[in-house]
Image: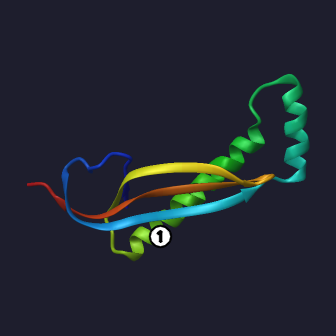
């Protein structure tokens, strides 16, 4: 499965657009990370636990998007975008979305 955040795949023509596909996850923080994050805000710097949590959530959202694209018979997902929002105190939603397409190799 080819994944790009542009509207084409180099070397290929879009044979068919199959529709928008998405993957999302709502990830919550845990008390241990919250305590350590609170301590980190005193001295400043990256909060590595949250960075790791968001990276994992982004990977899971991407996988869910790819699974949906594969179920449609797609060869690629183009125009991939990511979004995030706070859905409640201590929880964030990560969404990955794009257009599932069938490809044809350019001559």
Near-viewer residue (42 or 53): 42
Q: Position of residue 40 (x, y in %)?
A: 85, 31
Residue, far left: 107
At a point 91% along the width and 42% down the height, the residue shown is: 35
Instruction: Give the answer, above or below, for where 70 lies relative to 84.
Output: below
Residue indicated by mark 1:
67
Residue 21 found in image quarter = bottom left
Direction from residue 99 to residue 46 in the image, left or right = right
Residue 37 found in image quarter = top right
Near-viewer residue (11 or 54): 54
Label 1 secondary element: helix
Near-viewer residue (54 or 83): 83
At a point 90% along the width and 49% down the height, the residue shown is: 32
Q: How many marks?
A: 1
Q: Residues within 10 Å of mark 1 (few under 14, many from 20)?
A: some
Direction from residue 28 to residue 68 in the image, left or right = left
Q: Position of residue 99 (x, y in %)?
A: 36, 60
User: Which quadrant holds the C terminus?
Assistant: bottom left
At a point 34% along the width and 67% down the height, the residue shown is: 19
At a point 89% along the width and 26% down the height, the residue shown is: 42
User: Which quadrant holds the N terminus?
Assistant: bottom left
Q: Position of residue 79 (x, y in %)?
A: 37, 51
Q: Position of residue 92 (x, y in %)?
A: 70, 53
């Amino acid at each position: 499965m080819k994944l790009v955040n542009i509207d084409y795949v180099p070397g290929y023509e879009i044979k068919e657009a199959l529709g928008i596909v998405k993957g999302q996850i709502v990830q919550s923080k845990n008390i241990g990370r919250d305590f350590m994050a609170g301590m980190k805000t005193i001295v400043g710097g990256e909060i590595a636990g949250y960075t790791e949590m968001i990276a994992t959530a982004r990977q899971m959202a991407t996988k869910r998007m790819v699974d949906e694209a594969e179920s449609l018979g797609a060869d690629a997902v183009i125009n991939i975008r990511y979004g995030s929002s706070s859905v409640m105190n201590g929880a964030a939603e990560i969404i990955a979305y794009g257009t599932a397409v069938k490809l044809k190799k350019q001559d």
